[in-house]
Structures are given as C-alpha cells and as structure tokens.
Image: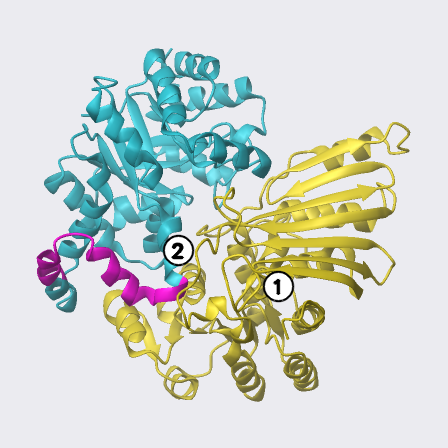
Amino acid sequence: MSFGKAIFGDNQFLGVNHANQAKAGELYERFKRPDAILEVLAAAYDAGVRDFMFTTHDRYEPVFDEIRRSKLFPGMHYSPCLPYAHKYWYQLSNKGVAALLASTVLQVNPLRIVPASIGVLTGRTRSLTHLLTEIEVLMCKGLPIRGVFLQNAAFDLLLAMNLTGFIEDFHKVVSHRLGALPGFITMNHPKARKVLCSQIGLDRPWVCANLNQAGFRMNPSQTLCEESFGSRQTRNIAMSIFSSGTLDPSKALDYVVSHMRSGAVDSVLFGSSSRENIQANYTKITA
Amino acid sequence: MKILVIGGGKMGMSHLALLTQYVGKANVALCDSKRSTRWMFRWLLGYKVYPTVDIALARMGRPSGVLIATPTPSHATLANWAIEHQLPFFIEKPLTLDVKRSTDLVKKAADANVPAQVGFVLRYVASFQRLREMVSSGALGPVKTYTASMRGNFMMEPPEPGNWQGIFSRGGGCLNEYGPHIIDLCHFIFGEVDRIDSVEAAKVVCSQADDRVSVNWTHRDSTQGRLEADWCDASKRKSTIEFLVSFAYAEVRVDNSAIEIKWSNDAPVTAEQRARFETPVKPFNVGFYLRGEEFSLELEEFLSICSGQRQHIDGEVPDGIAAGLKDGWEVDRVIDEIARKAGLK
C-alpha cells in the first residue's frame, strides 16, 4: 500500500492561505457549504486523484456522510491528519492541559479510559495514544483509510519536547491497530528525519513537509531540507509547493517535479479550488 | 544556558517546548503552583518541575533567564522577583494592565540594569516589519491616515459565569485580549500614541466585558489612525490582523502574510524602490518551527539577551525588534485610557 503521486489537500476548504489572509477569508466562507466541498472533490476525482488528505475538522462530517450515503468517488482513499489543533488550542486557555485531556477522552466509552489512565500512571502511554487517535478518526468510519498523519502542530510539539515514546506509540497504533500508513507532518524535516530514523529507528517513515522553490517554511534552511529529502531515509510528501501562490506556479511545480524525478519526493500534496488548476497540476505531477 | 519557565498554561508549554530545542531538555525547568500541571509535565512529559520560584532557584541553581507565562495578575510580583535576583526575564503580554505597577517595574528594572523582554510576538511577523520600514523610510511619502484591525472568532458564545475571559476587571474582554497585540503593533510601526480622540465599545456575547472596540487616536508625530478590534467575528477561522494605510504616494494593505500596494499615478518612487517593497514577504528561517516563525524568533532574541550572543539562525533577522518593559508600559497606558473613555473602568 502506498500513496498516489498526487494527493489532494484541504487548505482551501478551511480557509488556509499562507500568502493572503483576505483570500483565506473568502475561501473559509465559500466552503462552509458541504456541497461546495463536494464539487471540488469531484473535480479532483475526475482529474484522476485518488488520495484526499484532510484535517479532522467538523466541517467534513456532513461531507463524509454524503460520500457514504451516495457512495461517491469509488476508489478514493482518505488520509486524516490529526488533531485539528485549533479546537484544542482554544480550550487549553480555559481548561488547562489535564482537564482538556480528560474532557477529550470522555468522548468515547468511559470504560476505555480506565486502562488508558492506568497506562499513563505507570508510564505506558500507548492506550492513551490509541484512544486519542481513535477519537479523531471517528469521522472517517466506513471510508477507506490509506494513511493517518500526525499534524505538525502535534508532531513538532512532540519532537520539540523529545517525546519519542508518543511518536513511536502513534506509529504502532496506526500501522498495527488501524491498518493504515502512519505519517508525520513537520516544518522541521531534518530534525524529524533524525529522530524518526536514527533515534526511534523507523524504516523509511512517511514524512510530509514543505518543499518549494522559495524556501518558504523550510527550517532551519532550504539547503538542509533539500539534503534531508534527498537522503531518502524517509518517504517524502512535498507540500506548500506553490508557497501559497507567491511564485510563478509553473516554475514552482517544475522545482518539485525535478525532486520527484531524483527520488527525493514520493508524492506531492496540493490543493486548489479551481477545476482547471486541479487538472493541470495533476497532469504535471503524474506525467 | 538554563532557563526557568514560570506557568504551565498553553503559552508556557509552547515556550518550554521551543526552548527545549534551543538549550536542551536538561536545561529547562517549569515552575507552576498547580499540582496537576506539575504532575503532567513531570511524569508524562519528562521535565523538571518546581512549585515555587524560590524552590526552583534553590534546586536548579541560577538560571540564565526566566520566562514568565502566568496569568497577568501575577506578572508584577514575578517580574519584581526576577529583578531582585538580577535575572534577565521574558514576560508575556500584557505587562500588568495596571499603569502604576507597570511604571514601577520599568523604573526598577532600569535602576537594577536587568534586561527584560515583553512577548509582543507580532513584531516578528515579516509583513509587519516591512510596513514599519515603509513608514520609517518615508519612501511612500508621509502617512495620511490608517486603520488597524484585529478580528477573530475567539468568543462566539457567552462565556460561563465566573470565566475571567468574560470579565473586564479580571483581564478579560476584547480590549484586554486583542488590544495588547494590535496596540503594540501600531506603536511599533507608527510610534507612540499621543492622545485618544474617541472610543466606541460594544457588548455582543459578554455581559461584563467588551466584545468590540473602535478607537480614533493621534500619534506624537500627528499621524491619525483608527483601531478596530472584534473577537466575535463569525467570518474568521482564526484571528486576523489587517492594516489599511494611506500614504501620500500609495494605498497599502498589509495582513499577517501579504502586502498589496496601489501606487498613485504621480508617485515619485523609483522602480527599484517599488520592486523592493512589492517583493512578496518570506518569513525568516528559524532554528526550530513550532507555531509560527514569530514564536521561535522572539525566543531566539531572548536567548540572545541571556547569552550575550546572537542566536538567530537566519542572518537577515534585523536587530532591535524586541519589545522592552517601556513598550509594555506604553500598551498598558493606552488600554487604560481607552477603557476609561469607554466606561469599562
């Protein structure tokens, strides 16, 4: 099992645009309607895309309900990225870390909390990781899941705090219990590679990180990120390839495609809200 | 270099995590009075924790700096403690929300020669730095007027009774929450505010605090500006800042990431200058990215203060960006005057 060369992303559906807040606001409004999301997903499907990678935002609940009910997009695979950090971040101000954790795990069968809590008290966190992961992927129940990714807000936090045990737990839970490909989104590719491959010892894990001609959010530097992608110790998904529209799109795509040909990039994550752009990008990425 | 973080809330946790990457886990410790927070950070996250600052100082030895990320009411006490112990400190915004206490802190730190940084993080956003350069260089002509706005969906439903975020006198409300960010940015870009000309405040979801504030003010150099803050805007996914600036030779719109310039037909600005200002802004590279470059950059700056050596990984990061205690005092002073004019105090 592997991802296709072109993975459709969801920044446009959530109003994320790194280069223009005004455009971000327009997109956020436009995609409040589930139908608007379904129309763009249909365009991606028609273009040939078979992977949709998304954050676990409440906005997708009615979208997935409709996909299941009407059996839309046969052959499409879904890869949730969790957690949707904003919903937890806001609650953190009011509740604090401990209470937030408690209220989150209470969303599932309270009996499941017992082994998770005992695990935490005795220093074993896998039950807790399993529980939290399961809560987040509930919305995709009944859909074919290809991968489950840890968002950079969570993964880079674990990375920052040197919490390799949680990262290892997540990898095991996703691959063994959910039967999906575990993946990690990061803004610090070189550091992530070192921890995942050298410290934890994972065999070519899937890592999704920025790779773009402008060097946008490639930390600590564009050169070190290019070298890290090129090491091929990880399987790489390139994202932010257009640097949110700050570059000539054709040259931006050429840059990423050249890294794909050299083997540094396995898949490309891209988002768009226009049928024409989706088709053009898909064709170039998969050529 | 050892750093003590005081306060294990969301900002404290974010700073602690970032600092771990810069100085190593063995060299950061957390001080928090809450037992559950200490338990979480010690047993689950593996950090050294202490219940009080004095115990921390006794057990961990003298840190190179302390980072104060507790709720605002405790800021003055902890800052005074850091000054008394001659410890460089970083303190989250707002400084104290009490003009007299902030005035005392500024003086005490200056007298003791203790360096301090206030967490006005948006100063490190590249687009706002570009706007500051546009204003200070005078290349686009003098500023005629501007509007600065901060809008978000922070408070969409009435807060639970007793929740401090819905009570102005306890540091809640839109002016106290959004005000420090946007007021400091205006101060950073256009200089000190000389007088508040008019204020309007409205309650939408909170009964004991403001939800929307608009202010007209005049800066020391006579520039007139308008501030609009709204924390219950349903059209926003997250808080968004926007400046609309009318220069003599151009109309400029700037947000957290983009700059749009409309030149007037007769603008005496060279093609080279235009290209310099129109080039899309790119955030600076950082040693470790967690929530946005600006959070890493402000800590790199603080570590530079603590170590006496520049800690930025990107050679392009300008110097002199950090907010000091006087900047924190200035924001407290402006908020106080707005609150009085709005009838919130």
Percent of width and height locating residue B343: 66, 71
Task: Left or right? Give the position of B225 relative to B236.
Answer: right
Task: Left or right? Give the position of A152 relative to B246.
Answer: left
Amino acid of disc 1: Pro
Instruction: Report if residue B53 is visible in the image.
Output: yes
Q: Which chain is cyan?
A: A
Magenta span includes B212: no
Residue for badge 2: A89
Disc 1 to disc 2, how far (Cα)?
20 Å
- Please determine whether, in this image, residue B15 is positioned above or below residue A282: below
Residue for badge 1: B180
In the rendered image of the structure, the colour used to display chain B is yellow
The picture quadrant where one finds residue B338 is: bottom right
- Please determine whether, in this image, residue B36 is positioned above or below residue B272: below
Percent of width and height locating residue A20: 58, 36
Label 1 residue SS: helix
Magenta span includes A94: yes
Q: Could you tell me if the residues under marks 1 and 2 are in contact, i.e. CB atoms within 8 Å?
A: no
Q: Which stretch appears magenta? A: A93-116
Q: Residue at coordinates 20% horizontally, 24% vertically from top-left?
A: A69
- Chain letter, disc 1 residue: B
Q: Residues within 10 Å of mark 2 (few under 14, many from 20)?
A: some
Count the labels in the image: 2
Percent of width and height locating residue B265: 87, 27
Percent of width and height locating residue A221: 50, 42
- Chain letter, disc 2 residue: A
Question: Where is the C terminus of chain B found, in terms of image quarters?
Answer: bottom right
